[in-house]
Amino acid sequence: MDRAQSHPQAEPLSAHRLFCTSDIDLARHGVAGKFCAHDLTPGAGHHDFAVRHNHAPGQSLSLNFLSYGSEVVIDPGELTDFYLLQIPLRGHAEVTTGRREVAADPGCASLLNPTRSTRMIWHQGCEKLLLQIDRGALHHLAESLLAQPLPQPVIFDPEVRLDSPVLQGWLREF
């Protein structure tokens, strides 16, 4: 059962609505304005295409809720400036980042690294909570914690198992 079904509630971040549209070009432009330029191609069920994007900004991170309604193929290439933790609340997606493939669903999130090329298929009904983290801020924090410069960017494993005991307490809040 999806977390969203087990904890019925209002749409996440609904008080922070950025936009809602069924226009593909407006959706691409709106999402790119908060993340990065990308190719966006509706797939099967494109008549249900209806993007909802809620956005709560912070200093070095933002929290977002995003849904496309229909299946979409999203190809941002390298994110460059940020990391993106994508937590599926409903549905599933196939995420290819670098040489890894992640089958994302409510039990498995994906974590996109800024220096790895990414391509995704969000299937119809996929809704995600997205945590965007500024690359420079994370790099600076890592260097401060290690008390030494890092010669390369921080790279995370792109598959995040949400059923791990460490994450269970945090996820109950959603």
Image (tube, grey):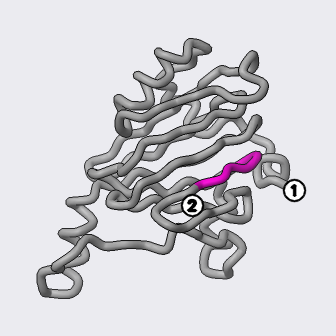
Relative to 116, is 89 on the left or the right? right
Task: Say which mark, if any, is on residue 1.
Answer: 1
Q: Residue 76, image x and y in percent?
A: 43, 42
Residue found 59% across the figure and 54% down from its top: 95
Give the alpha-carbon distance from disc 1 to disc 2, as whole Å.
19 Å
Between 72 and 99, the one lying in front of the other is: 99
Residue found 48% across the figure and 16% down from its top: 25
Is 41 drawn above or below residue 132 in the view shown? above
Q: Residue furthest top?
A: 23
Relative to 136, is 114 on the left or the right? right
From the image, tell me which residue sits under label 2.
Answer: 110
Q: Residues within 10 Å of mark 1 (few under 14, many from 20)?
A: few
* Mark 2: secondary structure: strand
Is 79 drawn above or below residue 166 in the view shown? above
Residue found 36% across the figure and 51% down from its top: 78
Q: Which residues are magenta?
A: 89-95
Residue found 72% across the figure and 21% down from its top: 46
- In what quadrant of the picture does the N terminus appear? bottom right
Between 117 and 48, the one lying in front of the other is: 117
Tell me which secondary structure the magenta stretch mostly adopts.
strand
Please report whichever mark, 1 or 2, sits nearer to the chain's N-terminal start. Answer: 1
Observer-side mark, 1 or 2, equals 2
Q: Residue 79, image x and y in percent?
A: 35, 49
- Identify the amino acid type marked 1: Met
Is 32 a magenta residue? no
Q: Residue 132, image x and y in percent?
A: 40, 51
